[in-house]
Amino acid sequence: MKRIYYLTGCSLLGVGLIFLLYIMAAKANSRPNGFIRLFPPHRTTPVKILDLQYDSYYFAGGTGQHVYVGNYSVPARVLVVNHALTDTQQLQLALVDRNKLVRVSSVLTVDSPDIYMLEGQTPTLLYGTLPSGLLHRVPDSIHFIASQPLSPTSFVIRVFSDRLQQNILAKQVSEAPAVRPAPEVLEKQLDGLFCTDGMLYYERDPARLVYTYFYRNQFICLDTNLKVLNRYRTIDTNSHVQISVSALPSKGASTISAPPVTVNRKSCIAGDRLYVNSGLLANNEDKKTFDRWSVIDVYSLTNGKYEFSFYLPDYQDKKMRSFRVFDHTLVALYDHYLYSFRLNF
């Protein structure tokens, strides 16, 4: 009986510690963080909402007229939606080698007319063009965590370097050497895995890449050969990651053991601007407003300067999951809804 009480007590203590860490992380995100935001009036105007029926959709790409939406449950299908959210079209992709299966973990990237299907565990890189949607296999890929296509013969990948014990970026091309690592881009602060985690975006004109860290106040501008052009700071004060990492010896892996302080939740690039959905409350913000809306900070990619911020509302008590900007249109994804806004700047 004493043993049962002891085990029960240990279990309750463990649950209590996890709950305490969660509360501490939530407070760190929602307390004033030593900076202020600028909120010019009337930056956005709600336009239209489209019900997608399922919550398994994600943004795969877009053009000046359309948004391409992938589906985690049906990886070979693309939904094409105009910016006004008034017209939709389903595209079915197919493999040239019909004996090969499309893995459920595959993710689409559309840079119209080019379309890519990427999966890093196998690994698999597939390429095709729209509107045919016929996908060809790109040979000789290495395992990767994330990938950003530049062209049918050139990809930027994020891999974990066993030698350096950290994430690094590399460029994979068709000619030798096929993989060209750039270990100097991502800077290790803690574990090398989670502390360097972030989002990578590519813009064709001008040709550049932007990497935004999740857990620190920095974004990096690079050329397509992974040369660092500039390292810029976001407006908050979190220059060092605040995460707790625990090892999982039985699986030979590690995990985040408490909810982290997430500085940059989501982001995207459009034109000469970076748009960041921040996870931190500014000194001049109302906490209730911050909790009911998603704040977007806008930065210049020309000089890295912060310009202003605006809010996107929650919809049906759901937070915005991701968003993309196309000229003066912003399209956000909420659960199984697309929500379009006109940008008045």
Image (cartoon, rainbow, N blue to C red):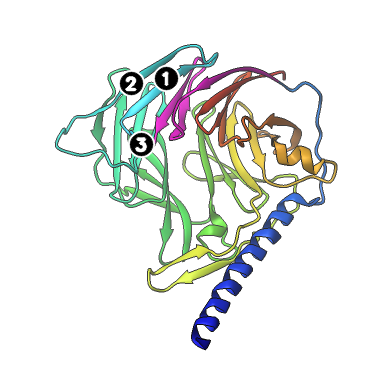
* SS of the residue under disc 2: strand
Question: In the current view of this chain or complex, which residue is farthest to the right?
Answer: 284
Residue 91, labelled with which disc?
Answer: 2
Looking at the image, residue 254 sits to the left or right of residue 275; the answer is left
Q: Closer to the N terminus: mark 3 or mark 1?
A: 3
**What span is colored magenta in the figure?**
45-72
Compared to 111, does 183 lie above or below?
below
Residue 296, labelled with which disc?
Answer: none
Q: For residue 97, which quarter of the picture?
A: top left
Q: Position of residue 90 (x, y in %)?
A: 36, 19
Residue shown at 46%/12% (left/top)? Answer: 87
Q: Closer to the N terminus: mark 2 or mark 1?
A: 1
Q: Closer to the N terminus: mark 3 or mark 2?
A: 3
Kindly report the distance in space between the C-alpha atoms of the residues bearing marks 2 and 1: 7 Å
Q: Which residue is mark 1?
A: 80
In contact (CB < 8 Å): disc 3 and disc 2: no
Identity of the amino acid at label 1?
Val
